[in-house]
Amino acid sequence: MRLRILIISLLLVLVGAGYCHAADALYLHLKEGRAALNNNDYEKAVAELSVFLEKPNLLADYALLWRAKAYDGLPAREKALSDIHQIKNEFPNSPLLKNALQYEIKIETKSNSERALMLIEKYLKDNPDDNALRLTYAKMLGDHGREQDSLREFTHIYLSGGPSSAEAAKYIDTASLSPSAILTRAKNLIGKFRYKDAENELMANISRAPESLKRQYTENIAMALFRQKNYKEAAGYFNKIGMSYFEARCLFRAGMYDKFREKLAALDPNSDRKAAELTLIHGLYYRRSGDTDKALAVFTSLRGNQFVAEEALWHIGWTMFLTGKYSDSYKIFNTLHTKYGASKYLYWMARALENKKEDPSALYKQLTAGDDFYAFLSYYKTGSRPSLIPQAELKAARDHDELKRLSILLELNIDDAIKTESLYIAKHAQMYPANVMLQAAVMLNEAAMYRHSIMLAGGVQYSAKTHWLLYPYGHKTTVDEAARRFSINPLLILSVIREESRFQEDAFSPAGAIGLMQLMPQTAQKYSGVVQERIDNEGDIFNARKNILIGGYYVSQLVKEMRCVPAAVASYNAGEHIVYKWLEAWHYKAVDEFIEDIPYDETEKYVKRVLKTYFQYTRESNPDGEAVNFAFDCQMM
């Protein structure tokens, strides 16, 4: 009800007191027509949509497409095509244009295959990656006796390595493909994260590849192995073709440190960025192994390096801090802050002073003026409260048809149309002034389309007004249920959801993680019984309620097990067994040291992002010391 009242109010502002689209019964005909179409009641759909199209309106392209589908269902082919042609002629910038072209092809395929072929050829020139339609095209070419053209298209699809390639393989002799074609397919498979498939196909064909392609075959085999974390084997292949940088990376990750050092000695860090980065990693290896003298020697050798001077100086300061040389580390952090200005350096200046038993309060106060991860840490260190950011009232934008269209669709609650319209606005954001983007973000937030709302609000200059759009309390009912059932802070669940998927329910990662909280299938299966949410297949994991309850339970168990929120968040990303190894190996004195020193760069950044997001969520809900302490009070430190 609150959503309906808000949108009606927005519409009143948007279109003026003299003419309110939402109150006009005309748009009810659009909604009724769409509902009838969904129910296969084609006659009613045509009748309702025809009434709607008799008068001027802002959504004629939607009505025309839906009426074309209804006409096609009757069937009334010519009338359906007439509506499609009207969209093409009168609405060339419509977000529905691609849909209309696809439906025109579908209609023509039934009775005029020659014209359908012509339309597909034209469509594929503008949309060459639409392999689903290309598959239809290839089959039609074969039906028309154009065997060579059909074979060419099936081969094109197969080589792309996409979802349609398995079907295309049924129509070609894959064993007869040239080594060059196999190489093309393997590269595409790697680009689609199908590393094992790429490895297998390259290995099966490298023996018949000509000398001119041997190097590329070897390089792509090595890269496929590297992406699968088969570092030792990958190193051997990189060695064959003299790719020393990647070979050295593989040797290091495989724990073959003597060979790594041998390879590193042949590289020049002063003329090659990658060599400089490897040298830096070498210094980190010495520090983590306890040999601080060698580590400092490596870092010092890079202080004047054109590629990694800042990182080298940071690691000198950080090594000194971790070994208790707080005065020396303070000087280095101060130098870094003076030159580069990052809050990270200011924070560790404060911590160095603190460990020296000197007063760091002025520095912490300076940090709390910001809103990043280090500001959050500084609130914790000082015991102060973050300022509350109340939800601001946003004024509606005026005189923009795009928002009027979106407003009407939101009120009519036609989900797929809302998604189509909002994506179109987001993709063309540069065309609109900031106030239009901001208001569109407000509308989408109220419609629970959080991903698109965050996307739009992120394109507007940050302010208190945009804060609550960037950090929405999405799926509140389920999040609160998970928090209550599993005794976990709901804002932590929200923070994980936001950073894992930006509230995208159908999110799917290359590693196979699924849904809002990016659950791995084995994790979902493991905890589904405990949570009493049945998982019959991977599709069930995309269900928002199941995903949040299982993910929320998993987070709660990690927090209980690790007794430390940052360690739990790190475990969610890297695995608890890995995090336990880190904790046991280096015996950190404080939680901030653990976070800063996380060995996996991806995990370190992930933990900081989640905690910063948690910090921002606390600022929307009367933040207090307890909310801050929850994030950093760690019993395991």
Image (tube, rainbow, N blue to C red):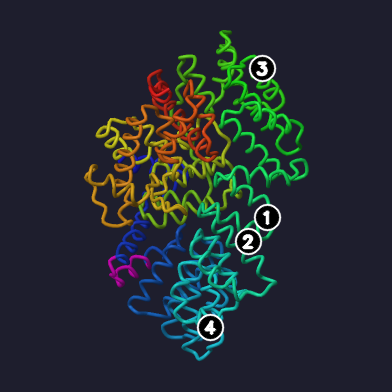
- What residue type is disc 3 on? Asp
Count residues near mark 1 (Cα–Cα under 10 Å), then give few for <14, some for 14-19, many for 20+.
some
Count residues near mark 2 (Cα–Cα under 10 Å), then give few for <14, some for 14-19, many for 20+.
some
Q: Which span is picked out in magenta?
A: 39-50
- What residue type is disc 4 on? Leu
Count residues near mark 3 (Cα–Cα under 10 Å), then give few for <14, some for 14-19, many for 20+.
some
Does 21 appear above or below 116?
A: above
In percent of width and height, residue 342 lies at 63, 27
Instruction: Measure the alpha-carbon separation of dots 1 and 2.
Output: 8 Å
Residue 89, can we see it?
yes
Q: Secondary structure at mark 4?
A: helix
Quarter-of-image position of residue 212: bottom right
Tell me: 238 left or right of 482. right
Instruction: Measure the alpha-carbon separation of dots 4 and 3.
Output: 70 Å
Image marks 1 and 2: residues in contact by CB distance under 8 Å: yes
Q: Which residue is mark 1?
A: 243
| Numbered mark located on residue 151 in the image | 4
Residue 392, can we see it?
no
Q: Secondary structure at mark 3?
A: helix
Quarter-of-image position of residue 548: top left
Q: Which residue is mark 2?
A: 219
Q: Earlier in the sequence, mark 1 or mark 2?
A: 2
Does 235 appear above or below 562?
A: below
Where the C terminus falls, by quadrant? top left
Tell me: 240 left or right of 145. right
- Tell me which residue sits at (47%, 82%) in the image: 171
